[in-house]
Amino acid sequence: MRKGEITRNAILDRAVRLASQVGLSGLTIGRLADELELSKSGLFAHFQSKETLQVQVLGRASHMFVQLVVRPALAAPRGEPRIRAIFDRWIEWTRKAELPGGCLFVTAAAELDDRPGPARDRLVELQREWMDFIATVVKTGISEGHLREDLDVDQFAHDLYSVMLGYHHADRLLRDPRAQSRARSAFESLLSAARREPRRRTA
Amino acid sequence: MRKGEITRNAILDRAVRLASQVGLSGLTIGRLADELELSKSGLFAHFQSKETLQVQVLGRASHMFVQLVVRPALAAPRGEPRIRAIFDRWIEWTRKAELPGGCLFVTAAAELDDRPGPARDRLVELQREWMDFIATVVKTGISEGHLREDLDVDQFAHDLYSVMLGYHHADRLLRDPRAQSRARSAFESLLSAARREPRRRTA
């Protein structure tokens, strides 16, 4: 990596942390300059505008997520173990990434859903990629024979995302000490319903 | 109702709608005054501070939610029909309340989770009340014999909340046309797993 890139990434790492607390809209170049004790003009040279900064912060957060969740999950065996690795890494990712305000993607989703523009577009793209990744891994659960063949893998990805949103809400807003055990229980139910073993239909 | 109260509620109705789009932090007295074409000093006389305004907006949104979701749900028969009524009304509530930016409580949760103060306290109180209400209704599902006796009703409330957060995310951010059918499918799975009929354990 060139020196400029190293500097830029170090700045973005701090920006991701700050944005997890104050939101993407709270992340101005001025505020970031104060936080980093750098000159505002120096940061402008790196990022040109608040919008460019937002888009790059999302990209950097995604890079962290790939390092902390996606790569380790891909190291797990295909099928159910890999799905479990996704869950285990995902639920820990903000702690490992040292994001004081919890998941930046959750915060950004609530902020950007009504704000068209490049940051929203980038976020939607990243979220869709992630849902597709989960669906692909769930497919390996079918091909390995762990999960039922008629499983709707996109529904599974949607449901797993819901479990993580519920976890974030219980943990960050309600400070519910059972947040993680609730999420784990929801995940086990989801997986149980997706398994191959035949069971009596109740509906 | 006194005339002052009627005026205040009319102002708060508009404020709830605006906040659903711009967030609670975007809802300044100045911006609301512009929106309503009222004087800023007149609004200050009603609400004194942005913080008071935020707390009252949450209270007003809760009043709308009670009218549109809680009361109609209580009119449904106890047990499963009432749980279904909660789901059906809840998923439609932002449309019925004409909230252009979706559920204010979801937006506010992401905004306030790291901001201690009266608005956060009020939001947490409202969310806990709502979870407790769901758990109480789910208990009627057990006493009516619709749901299993060993069901963890607080887990059910948590999981139902997760389903609605997933719906909001898919609908508002991803503009997924299947958002509602995904949520309905997740709800049916949740209910199916909670039913009384014995079924083969898969885990």
Image (cartoon, coloured by chain):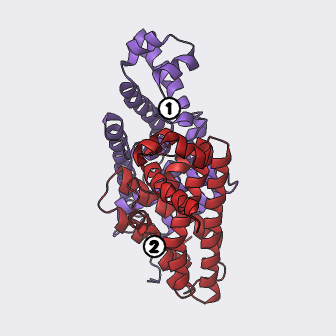
Chain colours: A red, B purple
Q: Which residue is mark 2?
A: A89
Residue A3 visible? The answer is yes
Q: Going by the image, does A100 lie left or right of B95? A: left
- Which quadrant holds residue B119? top left
What residue is drawn where x is 37% and y is 53%?
A172
Q: Position of residue B122 (x, y in %)?
A: 34, 37
What residue is drawn where x is 58% and y is 49%?
A46
Q: CA distance from mark 2 to mark 1?
A: 34 Å
The amino acid at mark 2 is Arg
Q: Position of residue B192 (x, y in %)?
A: 51, 68
Vertical order, A95 against A41 (above or below): below
Disc 1 on helix, strand or loop?
Answer: loop
Looking at the figure, which quarter contains the C terminus of chain B?
A: bottom left
Looking at the figure, which quarter contains the N terminus of chain B?
A: top left
Q: Residues within 10 Å of mark 2 (few under 14, many from 20)?
A: some
Number of numbered discs visible in the structure rendering: 2
A5 or B163: which is nearer to us? A5
Vertical order, A148 against B39 (above or below): below
Disc 2 on helix, strand or loop?
Answer: helix
Q: Going by the image, does A117 lie left or right of B63? A: right
Q: Which residue is mark 1?
A: B26
The amino acid at mark 1 is Gly
Residue B188 visible? The answer is no
What residue is drawn where x is 62% and y is 66%?
A131
Task: Return the mark for residue A121.
Answer: none
Q: Position of residue B172 (x, y in %)?
A: 61, 47
Vertical order, A63 against A136 (above or below): above
B17 or A193: which is nearer to us? B17
